[in-house]
Amino acid sequence: MKLIVGLGNPGKEYANTRHNMGFMVVDALAKQWNLSPFKANFQGEYVTHTLHQVILLKPTTFMNLSGQSVFAICQFYKISPQEIVVVYDDLALEPGKIRLRMTGSSGSHNGMQHIIDTFSTQEIKRIRVGIGAVPLDQKGKDYVLGVPSKEDQKKMNQAIQDSVSAIEVYIKTNFSQAMNQFNRGDSD
């Protein structure tokens, strides 16, 4: 069983914000796979794709406590950290870019850091979805919790689709193949 975790914050006020890119990717994947509605449990919302043996999870603990939800579902389904892919927003990437990594630091992303701390390992696959750097005239919190411009949203919609495609390549082949296919262009 594999676990795809999309990070975000619950509630309508956060629904279309930059910080909810992970939720948006998981929702797009569930829609593409025609999965039934998400169920509430494990301090999150989840749905299972039995054919692919994949669980999609959106923690509802708020971003900074995401590890609680991920740990709870992994305990129940006996999923190892090596079978987890976490999808989240990244300030270091331009809108529209994605980067897949097998391991590494959180890059100062509090949700990913909480998952790393909870599992005591950086050996967790991740897909980072670019939202762009914080403009000089804005505070970081206001920027990530803000709604992107129409131009940036168009680029982010492409990144959401690329992330969905990368996850499908991972499910059908392996994560290295997905990295080779989707880590194009300039390195971060």
Image (cartoon, rainbow, N blue to C red):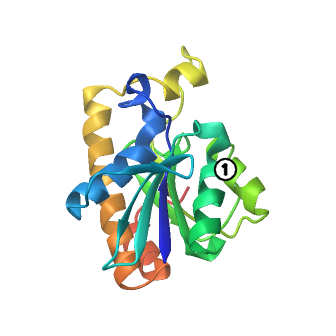
Q: Where on the picture, by quarter, is residue 31?
A: bottom left
Asked if residue 139 is positioned above or below residue 185 in the image, the reply reads above
Q: Residue at x 41, y 62 (%)?
A: 185
> Can residue 78 be seen by looking at this rendering?
yes
Quadrant of image for the C terminus = bottom right
> Can residue 112 be seen by looking at this rendering?
no
Crowd rating for badge 1 (residues with CA inside 10 Å; few <14, some 14–19, many 20+):
many
From the viewer's side, name the closer residue of 96 and 119.
119
Amino acid type shown at disc 1:
Gln
> Relative to 110, is 8 on the left or the right?
left
Q: Residue 34: horizontal and vertical position, in percent?
A: 20, 61
- In the picture as drawn, the residue positioned furthest to the top comes out as 137
Asked if residue 157 is positioned above or below residue 18 in the image, the reply reads below
Q: Residue 154: horizontal and vertical position, in percent?
A: 24, 39
Reading the image, the residue beneath label 1 is: 68
Mark 1: secondary structure: helix
Q: Residue 176: horizontal and vertical position, in percent?
A: 49, 80
Asked if residue 65 is positioned above or below residue 102 in the image, the reply reads above
- In the picture as drawn, the residue positioned furthest to the bottom comes out as 173
Q: Where on the picture, by quarter, is residue 140?
A: top right
**How many numbered tags mark residues here?**
1
Q: Residue at x 56, y 52 (%)?
A: 42
Asked if residue 2 is positioned above or below residue 185 in the image, the reply reads below
